[in-house]
Image: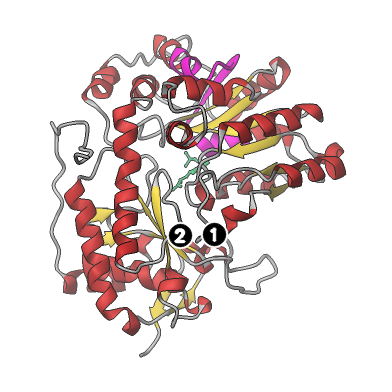
């Protein structure tokens, strides 16, 4: 088969400032070995996140010029609303400035002490908004979804038996059932259409609204097309519509599968809930026809939504991570298998087995990737999750490093360069040392903690 090429050509470029390894070592030291502390123009290849980092198309930039900045009733909102409904035909589409704002509004209304909200795996901000309301976030992903080495086509699936038992035991405490597609926190793994429908049925049997966190809905639909029996012949746009058909609402970050640099929405079918959500929106985001966004952002999202379901794009998108994953596997670097939609997750604890979890093998690997190759990644492990609420520190379930691929930004030679950086690290990996934390804030320490390398 021929190489799956980038299905676009490049009209506008941003220079990458080349740096040397000694310069990067100095910048790493100045940032206290926390990659969030780097200036992004000191990074060669930035794989920190796929969120808000997409390259917009010429048509999106053109759409931006059509943005109408009226406070109320802007035609940009009408275009945005129509574009969302074309894929996810919910009755009420409520724009927000990003995904977590939609979550904050939803759980302001549905959360509260004593409530429990099940999902396959809640993303951190979803969990954070649920917990901030006093409610409990419960993760019920299938067992394979917790095992990095397990090969399963839909590792993001909800454990249906566990959800049934949970609803039976806690029905009165559950205000809604959620499902994250793809399952970011579990490695960007997809959820099958059969599983989405089974979750919807179960939620409805107990009279609960079913809400999809749809951040990476198009990548999820592509996996359904490629992997689920009976779906191969269906256009992705139809699969997307089927994914949302049985849901009662969705939260969305347009910074992912809408190719926008900012934006999101909350969609609901329930009139009363939507009316309360709009009241909260006016208090915290803005009037319901802009919701914390400029009219031009709404137009960029509307256009992005027509591009994200392009199958040539999705084939290239999913192939990029599969390609990096295959090459890393060939090098002997353990990764979460199979590769997910938006990122490759490297099992740093497995690869740097001489670095104990409380010496942060993920952070050690992420620092080496930057120092040796100028590649910025993100530790998802004991630094992020290791500090318990009671102040004790424990190893996280896994120590992963996420290489998240911005959409339409990097080419295959950038991907090759990332793999070559791993090749260079492989030769010295047994000499890599862990780190210790010299300062950390009371919460969410991974963003601002300061580190120091442990002596050899
Ligand atoms: N849900 C999921 C599954 C996400 O991945 C994110 C963001 C959000 C909700 C929140 O959306 O950032 O627009 O407020 N994930 C980013 C990431 C930050 O790097 O994975 P937001």
Magenta region: 81-104
Image position of 235 with respect to 411: above or below: above
The structure residue drawn at horizontal position 20% and vertical position 47%, both measured from the top left corner, is 412
Q: Residues within 10 Å of mark 2 (few under 14, many from 20)?
A: some
Q: Is residue 247 left or right of residue 312?
A: right
Between residues 29 and 381, which one lies in front from this camera angle?
381
Tell me if label 2 and label 1 are in contact, CB under 8 Å. Answer: yes
In which quadrant of the rendered view does residue 41 lie?
Answer: bottom left
**93 magenta-colored:** yes
**125 magenta-colored:** no
Measure the alpha-carbon separation of dots 2 and 1.
6 Å
Q: At which x and y percent is residue 284?
A: 57, 31
Q: At which x and y percent is residue 365?
A: 36, 70
Question: Which element is circle 1 on?
Answer: loop
Marker disc for residue 444: 1
Q: Is residue 310 left or right of residue 392?
A: left
The structure residue drawn at horizontal position 47% and vertical position 37%, both measured from the top left corner, is 227
Q: Is residue 21 left or right of residue 370?
A: left
């Amino acid at each position: 088969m021929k190489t799956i090429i980038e299905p676009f050509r490049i009209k506008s470029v941003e220079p990458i400032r080349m740096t040397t390894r000694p310069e990067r070592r100095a910048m790493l030291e100045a940032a206290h070995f926390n990659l969030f502390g780097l200036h992004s123009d000191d990074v060669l290849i930035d794989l920190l996140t796929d969120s808000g980092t997409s390259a917009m198309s010429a048509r999106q930039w053109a759409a931006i010029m059509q943005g109408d900045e009226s406070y109320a009733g802007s035609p940009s909102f009408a275009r945005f609303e129509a574009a969302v409904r074309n894929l996810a035909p919910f009755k009420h589409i409520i724009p927000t400035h990003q995904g977590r704002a939609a979550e904050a509004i939803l759980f302001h209304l549905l959360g509260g002490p004593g409530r429990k909200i099940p999902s396959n795996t809640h993303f951190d901000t979803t969990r954070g908004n649920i917990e901030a309301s006093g409610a409990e976030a419960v993760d019920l992903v299938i067992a394979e979804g917790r095992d990095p080495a397990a090969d399963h086509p839909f590792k993001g699936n909800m454990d249906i038996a566990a959800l049934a038992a949970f609803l039976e035991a806690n029905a009165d405490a559950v205000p809604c059932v959620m499902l994250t597609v793809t399952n970011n926190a579990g490695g960007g793994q997809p959820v099958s259409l059969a599983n989405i429908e089974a979750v919807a049925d179960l939620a409805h049997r107990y009279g609960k609204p079913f809400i999809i966190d749809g951040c990476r809905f198009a990548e999820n639909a592509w996996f359904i097309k490629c992997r689920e029996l009976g779906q191969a012949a269906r256009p992705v746009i139809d699969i997307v519509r089927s994914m949302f058909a049985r849901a009662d609402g969705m939260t969305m970050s347009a910074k992912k599968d809408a190719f926008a640099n900012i934006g999101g929405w909350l969609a609901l079918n329930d009139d009363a809930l939507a009316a309360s959500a709009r009241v909260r929106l006016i208090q915290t985001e803005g009037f319901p026809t802009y919701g914390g966004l400029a009219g031009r952002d709404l137009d960029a999202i509307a256009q992005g939504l027509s591009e994200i379901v392009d199958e040539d794009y999705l084939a290239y998108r999913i192939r990029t991570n599969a390609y990096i994953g295959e090459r890393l596997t060939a090098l002997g670097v353990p990764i979460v298998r199979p590769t997910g939609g938006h990122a490759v997750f490297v099992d740093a604890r497995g690869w740097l087995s001489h670095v104990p979890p409380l010496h942060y093998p993920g952070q050690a690997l992420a620092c080496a990737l930057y120092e040796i190759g100028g590649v910025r990644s993100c530790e998802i492990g004991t630094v992020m999750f290791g500090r318990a609420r009671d102040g004790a520190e424990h190893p996280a379930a896994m120590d992963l490093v996420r290489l998240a691929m911005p959409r339409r930004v990097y080419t295959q030679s950038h991907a090759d360069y990332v793999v070559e950086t791993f090749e260079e690290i492989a030769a010295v990996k047994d000499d890599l040392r862990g780190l210790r934390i010299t300062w950390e804030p009371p919460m969410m320490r991974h963003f601002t903690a300061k580190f120091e390398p442990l002596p050899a």
